[in-house]
Image (cartoon, rainbow, N blue to C red):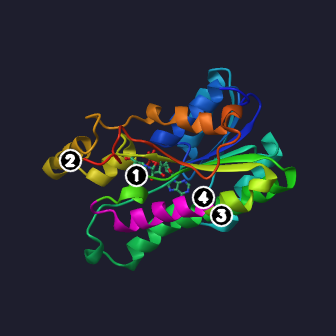
Amino acid sequence: MRGLEGKVVIVTGGAGGIGSAICRRFGEERASVAVFDINREAAEAVAAEIQSAGGKARAFAVDLTSQDSVITAVTAAEAELGPIDVLVNNAGWDKVGNFLDTEKPLWDKIVAINLYGALYMHHAVVKGMRERGRGRVINVASDAGRVGSSGEAVYSFCKGGLISFSKTLAREVARQQININVVCPGPTDTPLLDDICGEGERGEKLRTAFTRAVPFGRLGQPGDLPGAVTFLASDDAAFITGQVISVSGGLTMAG
Ligand code: NAD
């Protein structure tokens, strides 16, 4: 990818399935990677892996549901690595269930990580990009936010919100040459999907249903996502903003 060498990149949820694959790919592209995650040990392991492959990476423990924690981590990352060129808002969380059978504490948890976490990160990072007159943001939403997904009403509410927020903020900062785009995975084989499906017969059934929903006939793999994300961060995507790309084996196609 053109133009990624030496860029400072934050990846939230960088210790997770998709996030760690994105971090590794930016490491291979010679970017400086800030691995943001609530799981400090796992974030440090991803950073160490990138370093041992000759790349540059640092781990930062952060709880995205706390604005103070986000500000502290972004300040630390900028002090260690320099001004942020690329922000990848990838962290997310969900639990499957019928909306009418759930209550506010669960909604709060889903909204806190998927929506407020993204708001805090944009607020902490994009202001600096606006001052510098350049920057890239790639938000990892979900096909659930485009076409809905059974049992994921609150999550779909958040991911749909993240998509429209991205399009709107993209307009707000376009004159400052900041691009904000969205990548939507479909069902992808990560710890989150394991968690959503659960174990036993019900878990197997859910996994089969998710797989059948994908025209390609397989679940996404974490390695399916970094190509679209690094492309949107690269020089080749300089004139693309406010767009949504599904990386989900055709899940959103009709029929
Ligand atoms: P994952 O569970 O493997 O990774 C998520 C990471 O986020 C974990 O490392 C976790 O520690 C971190 N995290 C969770 N809460 C946090 C918090 N409060 N502060 C900081 N870090 C926190 O999940 P994944 O499947 O890799 O998901 C990555 C993104 O892709 C998410 O936004 C998810 O919604 C989206 N997505 C995933 C799928 C899928 O099927 N796996 C489908 C569509 C969209």
Marks 4 and 2: which is nearer the front? Answer: 4
Mark 2: C-beta under 8 Å from nearest atom of ligand 1:
no
Q: Is residue 89 above or below residue 108?
A: above
Gap in Å between the C-alphas at discs 1 and 2? 15 Å
User: From the viewer's perspective, is the residue at label 4 or at label 3 nearer?
Assistant: 4
Q: Position of residue 120 (x, y in %)?
A: 65, 64
Q: Does the magenta portion include 127?
A: no
Q: Which residues are magenta?
A: 150-167
Indicate the position of residue 46 as horizontal and vertical percent values. Answer: 57, 35
Residue wearing tag 4: 166
Residue to which mark 3 is pinned: 120
Q: Amino acid at mark 3?
A: Tyr
Quick one: label 3, few (<14), some, or many (20+) residues within 10 Å? some
Query: Dot 2 corresponds to which residue?
Result: 209
Lower sequence index among marks 1 and 3: 3
What kind of element bears circle 4?
helix
Describe residue 13's horizontal placement relative to residue 76 as left or right: left
Does residue 88 appear left or right of residue 247 in this picture?
right
Residue at point 52%, 68% (across, down)? 112
Contact, mark 4 vs mark 3 (Cβ under 8 Å) = no
Q: Earlier in the sequence, mark 4 or mark 3?
A: 3
Q: Is residue 64 visible?
A: no
Label 4 to label 1: alpha-carbon separation: 15 Å
Q: Secondary structure at mark 3?
A: helix
Which mark lies nearer to you, 3 or 2?
2
Label 2 near label 3: C-beta < 8 Å? Answer: no
Note whether ligand 1 is within 8 Å of mark 1: yes
Q: Which of these two is toward me, 153 or 104?
A: 153
Q: Amino acid at mark 4?
A: Ser
Q: Left or right: where does residue 166 sit relative to residue 92?
A: right
